[in-house]
Amino acid sequence: MDAEAVVSVRLVRSFEHRNFKPVVFHGVRLEQTVHEFMELVRGDIATKQGLPPPFRKYAYDTMKIIHQAHGAKTNELVMSLDDDEKLILQDDQTLRAAGVANETEVAFFREEDYRLYRENPKTAW
């Protein structure tokens, strides 16, 4: 198995307004913990050119697998509300143990925003 992967991270700023930006990370070590990867992503987006300031400074704290290479995609525009217990990544797991592989797409969001959206999954424009 490859030790490094390409992982797409969807920065979710608002579920209701479908406000998100994808950022691709190359050379991601799958043996690092989810917590370490979140720190790496936070550090990278804080200085990333072309990313609007609201995305750079947001308090992201949770990751969830949206899509894996060669798997079915969800019809949800931001991310699926299904299978949280299986797809939300646990801080102390390695990325590989959490199910992240090459070309996996994960959402990075604030858990509180997601919980509120799950309770009332309406979108606004």
Image (spheres, rainbow, N blue to C red):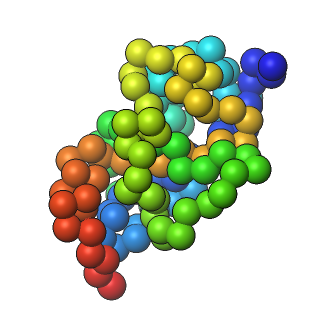
Depicted 95 relative to depicted 112: above or below: above
Q: Position of residue 31 (x, y in %)?
A: 62, 15
Q: Position of residue 26 (x, y in %)?
A: 72, 36
Can the viewer see residue 114? yes
| Left or right for 83, reference 116 | right
Can the viewer see residue 23? no
Q: Residue at x 59, y 30 (%)?
A: 99
For the C terminus, the image quarter is bottom left
| Left or right for 40, reference 58 | right
Q: Position of residue 38 (x, y in %)?
A: 45, 30
- Count of numbered labels shown in the rendering: 0
Q: Residue furthest bottom?
A: 125
Q: Residue at x 69, y 51 (%)?
A: 71
For the N terminus, the image quarter is top right
Q: Quadrant of residue 102?
A: top right
Q: Residue at x 75, y 18 (%)?
A: 3
| Left or right for 53, reference 41 | left
Depicted 111 relative to depicted 74: above or below: above
Depicted 110 relative to depicted 119: above or below: above
Depicted 71 relative to depicted 30: above or below: below
In the foreground, 27 or 55: 27
Q: Residue at x 33, y 63 (%)?
A: 14
In the foreground, 30 or 72: 72
Q: Position of residue 48 (x, y in %)?
A: 55, 46
| Left or right for 105, reference 91 | right
